[in-house]
Amino acid sequence: MRLNHALAERMSSMGRENNLDLVRFIIAAFVMYFHAFHIAGGEHSHELLRVILFFFISGFFVYGSFERWGNVKDFVRARCVRLFPGMVVLMFVTLFFIGPIVTDKSIMSYMTDTKTWEYLLGVTIVFLQQELPGVFTNNPYPNVVNGSLWTLQLELVYYASIVILSLLQLTKPRALIMLLVFTYILHYLSLPVGETYISLYRVFLLGMLCFVYKENIPIRHTFAFGSVLVLLVFWNHPWFHELFIFFGSYLTLYAIYVRKLTVPWSRLLGNCSYGVFLFGYPVQQSVQHFLPEISAGQNFIISLPFACLFALLSWLFVERKVFHYYKSDQLRTHKTANARIEQPMLK
C-alpha cells in the first residue's frame, strides 16, 4: 500500500534537490570526529554510530544505483570510477608527501624500504597495508597511516553481494527480508569468523530494504520526533546501538528528504565527502604527530579544514575529470542524455 508522504513520493518530487550532499559531508566529518578520540589516545563509547550510518546510506543509495543501471557491467564500472580515483590520489599523497615529512627514518631509507612500495597495493582496496616505514611510530595510535580504509573492504564485499543476489534472483523483497533475518541470527550466534562482516551487513541490507520498500516508509515529523525520543531514552543502554540501526537510519532518511535546505556549496561539499573520509585519518595522525599534547576535540577542529583541502584538490583535479570522462563515454555508448553515476557515500 502506497502511503501519503512516503519516502518514494519525496524522492520523486525532490529529485536531486535533497540534502544528500550535506548529509554525506556531515557523516564524513562525523567519522573524523570519532577517529580523533583514539588517535589522541582515548576512546568514545558511541564510535560505532559512524559505521552504522556509513553502511546504511551505502546500502540504500548503492542498491538504488544498481536498479537504475539495470545491468552488472555498468554498475561495476560506475562503482570503480567513483572509488578508485580518490584511492590513487590518497596512496600517492600519503606515500610521497605525508610519509617523507613525518617519518623518523632518512628519506633514502624510507624510499628504498620495500614496505614503502608495497603500500601502493592499497589502491586496490583488497590489499591494504596500514604501515609506512617510520611513520607515526610515536603517536598514541602508532604506525597506522589510514585506519578508516577497512570499511571500504567491506563495501566491496557488499557490492559483490548485490551482484550475486541479482544473478541468483534473490533481490525480491521477501528474499531480502529472509536474508536480513538470517544475518541477524548469525550475528547473535557470535561466530568466530567474519563477525564484523556479518554484523555490518545487517545495516547494509536494511538500507537495501528501505529502498525496496520506499513506497511504504512515511517521512513525517512525528516519526522523526519519536525516533529521537527513543534514542535519547536509551542513550546509555546496552541496546542503544541495536536501536540506532533502525531509528538512526530512519532519521538519516528523514534528514535527506524532509525538506531541501539551502546551504552554500552543498553540492561541492557532497562531492568532497568521500575525499574527507579518505584523507581525514592520515591528516589527523599528522596533526597528532606535530601537536602531541592536543585533545581529541582540538585534533578534529584543526584537522577538518586540511582534510577538506586535500579532498577538494582531489575532486577538482582528478576525481571530477575521471567522472566527466566516464559520463561522456556513457553518453557516447548508450546515446542517452540521462547516463549518470550515482554519487556514493562516504562513502
Image (cartoon, rainbow, N blue to C red):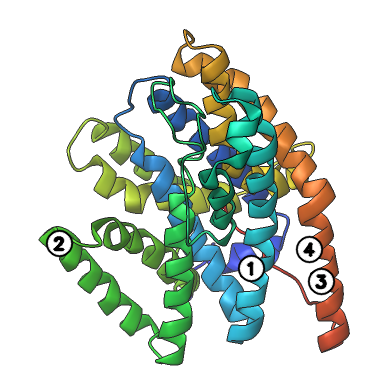
Q: Residue at x 35, y 43 (%)?
A: 226
Residue 225 in sight from this viewpoint: no
Q: Percent position (x, y) of residue 115?
A: 51, 45
* Disc assigned to residue 323: 4
Residue type for callout 1? Cys
Residue 157 in sight from this viewpoint: yes
User: In the picture shown, does residue 335 fall above or below 273?
Assistant: below
Q: Is the residue under label 3 in contact with that under label 4 (CB below 8 Å)?
A: yes
Q: Which residue is mark 1?
A: 80
Residue type for callout 3? Lys
Are there few (<14), some (14-19), or many (20+) residues within 10 Å of tag 2? Answer: few
Residue type for callout 4? Phe
Tag 3, which secondary structure? helix
Are there few (<14), some (14-19), or many (20+) residues within 10 Å of tag 3? Answer: some
* Disc assigned to residue 327: 3
User: In the picture shown, does residue 183 fall above or below 170?
Assistant: above
Q: Which residue is mark 2?
A: 191
Q: Nearer the viewer, mark 1 or mark 3?
A: 1
